[in-house]
Image: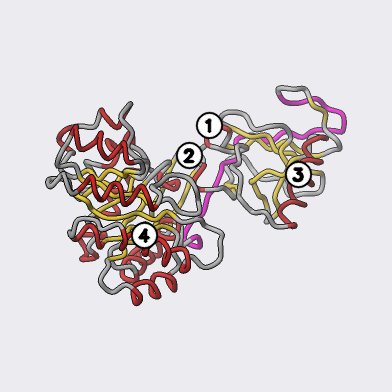
Amino acid sequence: MSLTLTVDGERWRQHLLATAEKHPGLVPVCKGNGYGFTLGRLARRAQWLDERGHGVDTIAVGTYDELPHLASRFDGDLLVLTPWRPFESALEVDPALSGRLVHTLSRPEDVRDLLARQPDARFVLERLTSMQRHGLSARDLWAVAAELRSHPRARLEGIAFHLPLQQGSHVGEVHRLMTDVAGAELPDTPGARTIWVSHLTDAELAELRAAYPDFRLRPRIGTALWLGAREAMRVTSTVLDVHPVSRGDAFGYRSRTAPKDGHLLIVSGGTAHGIGLEAPTGDSSIKARAGALARGGLDAVGFVRSPFSTDGKQRLFAEPPHMQASMLFLPGGARVPQVGELVDVRVRYTTTSFDRVVVA
């Protein structure tokens, strides 16, 4: 009676090992819902990669609030991706973690504030990229470099570039950012020659490593690492009930009426799991826009395609999903699944909370 993620463990583990082998300096990203696996499982798997000689000495976490879920399951350093600010959970971190914690600093005033509170703090400086989310401008970076020269105990661990996903080649932008780093005259430490990068392709990483042999590039990888072996993963729901309906029969919370003869299929998985709460995909193609318009039209008359499939065909929601279960409409003539039968579910892993994760 669960929404279950089942993983072919051997295929998944082989993918993780191959990815770590291909990316020296790998920093696994463990954030949010743990890409569907849970944060704790990802932390343990990152530790496993390190113990197999892949040098995974750091993981990247999303927020300070996630630290308790990860710190006891991974022995190495913890890079927090959300920039440090002088309030809330950033000031409530367990002091026992201070030696392992690497902050992200994205404003000059935060550099001054953090070092006033903790002169030997460890941190990366985030350079503003074309994403325009967080980061220091080139002028800010120069100002921070001057500030750091008066803080000899400060522990600069590197510069971070968080690049957009869909932009074509990132190489030109990275060259410009690297020029800013070189011109900032940061204190001459290993951290000043370490670049933490997100969303570079393998080819881009290889090209940039060849162009900057004196710098260490550390790729922060989440989706391609944890979800890169989709063929090893299957999401299933369980059929909880089946009810025959005739055209005009009322059903559900809103007393909708059946459009024709068929069956109502009650399956596990609802809004509490993320079903029906789809996040924007970012796909701006004409095909995607047409699909959105079509879904909007179906929604207006109560026929919305669900992520649940039987016999290889996606079925329609009979009404909006409930908290723990969903009602599907199965038209007459379709095979009727039995109670207890598994139903395939197509989900977005980063927005789905599974009842069970089974790594076989």
Gap between marks 1 and 4 measured at Cα:
46 Å
N-term mark: 3 or 1: 1
Upstream in sequence: badge 1 or badge 4: 4
Mark 3 or 2: in front is: 3
The residue sitting at 35% across, 69% down in the picture is: 18
- How many angstroms separate mark 2 from mark 4 (CA)? 41 Å
Labels 1 and 2 touching (C-beta < 8 A): yes
Reply yes or no: does residue 106 show up in magenta: no
Residue 148 in the image: x percent, y percent? 21, 47
- Label located before the other in sequence (3 or 2): 3
Q: Dot 4 corresponds to which residue?
A: 180
Q: CA distance from mark 1 to mark 2?
A: 8 Å
Amino acid on which disc 2 is placed? Ser
The residue positioned 32% from the left and 43% from the top of the image is 105
Residues tagged 2 and 4 counted as in contact (Cβ below 8 A): no
Query: Gap between marks 3 and 1, in whole Å?
Result: 22 Å
- In the rendered structure, which segment of residues is drawn in magenta? 230-252
Is residue 242 inside the magenta stretch?
yes
When the figure is inspected, residue 246 is found, relative to residue 61, above or below; the finding is above
Tag 3: residue type? Arg
Q: Secondary structure at mark 2?
A: loop
Give the prevailing secondary structure in the magenta stretch: strand
Q: Which residue is mark 1?
A: 272
